[in-house]
Image (tube, rainbow, N blue to C red):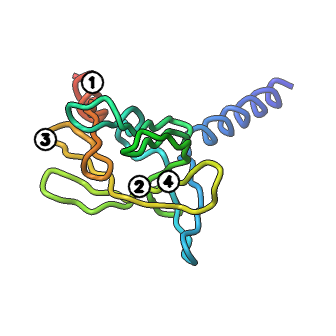
Amino acid sequence: MKFLKLLFLSSLFLTVFQSYSQIKVDQITYKIHDHYITTTIGYPVTGTFMSEGKKEPIVQLNPDGSGIFQFEDLTKENIVWGIECTEEGVPTFKEGFNSATYTFWYRDKNKEDWNYTQFSIHFNKKKMFIMGERMKDYEDYNEMQKQYSK
């Protein structure tokens, strides 16, 4: 009887652990091509992006893949977003000198057509950019983990 309880609890634990440890990947179609997107890339992508010295327009990215895209005329659009990745959830990017460039996908929450733009991370400056102009500062998870493990 104890063995069955232990077996049940172990399998329950492994199932829960495995389901929470996997990165969520969504498949989207742009024109006739399938792409895969995720909101998890190993850096703190979520938050508010704005042009330097301005409070608006903004891009707000939420952890659940929702957000707000505000246009230059200050109209707002509720969006669904993600960053391109492989089918397994590995982010695809182009490495630059102290930077990485990703494809940022978004669409109006009430429409089916996807749009894309550039998302970049500049490691030395600790800044992230959407469309090259809207930015936010960030803390590097990897550096924080190194500091805490010392």
Q: Earlier in the sequence, mark 2 or mark 3?
A: 2
Measuring from the top left, give residue 132's x and y in whole percent.
Answer: 25, 51
Mark with earlier residue (4, 1): 4
Q: Amino acid at mark 1?
A: Ser
In percent of width and height, residue 78 lies at 56, 42
In screen coordinates, is 86 left or right of 80?
left
* Amino acid type, residue under disc 2 in the picture: Phe
Q: Quadrant of residue 14?
A: top right
Label 4: which secondary element: strand
The alpha-carbon separation of the residues under discs 1 and 3 comes to 22 Å
- Most foreground residue, 133 or 30: 133
Q: Which residue is mark 4?
A: 106
* Residue 16: assigned label: none
Q: Quadrant of the N terminus?
A: top right
Where residue 98 sits: x, y (%)? 14, 50
Q: Secondary structure at mark 3?
A: loop
Q: CA distance from mark 4 to mark 1?
A: 37 Å
Mark 2 vs mark 1: in front = 2
- The furthest residue to the bottom: 32
x then y, percent, for residue 114: 53, 61
How packed is label 4: few (under 14 Cα within 10 Å), some, or many (20 or more)? Answer: many
From the image, state whether disc 4 or disc 3 is nearer to you.
4
**Which residue lies at the image location 54% right of the left edge and 46% below the top edge?**
79
For marks 1 and 3, give the one nearer the viewer: 3
Residue that numbered label 3 is attached to: 124
Give the residue at mark 2.
104
Is the residue marked by circle 3 packed among few (<14), some (14-19), or many (20+) residues within 10 Å? few
**Sequence-first tag of 2 and 1:** 2
Quarter holding residue 10: top right
Residue linked to disc 1? 149
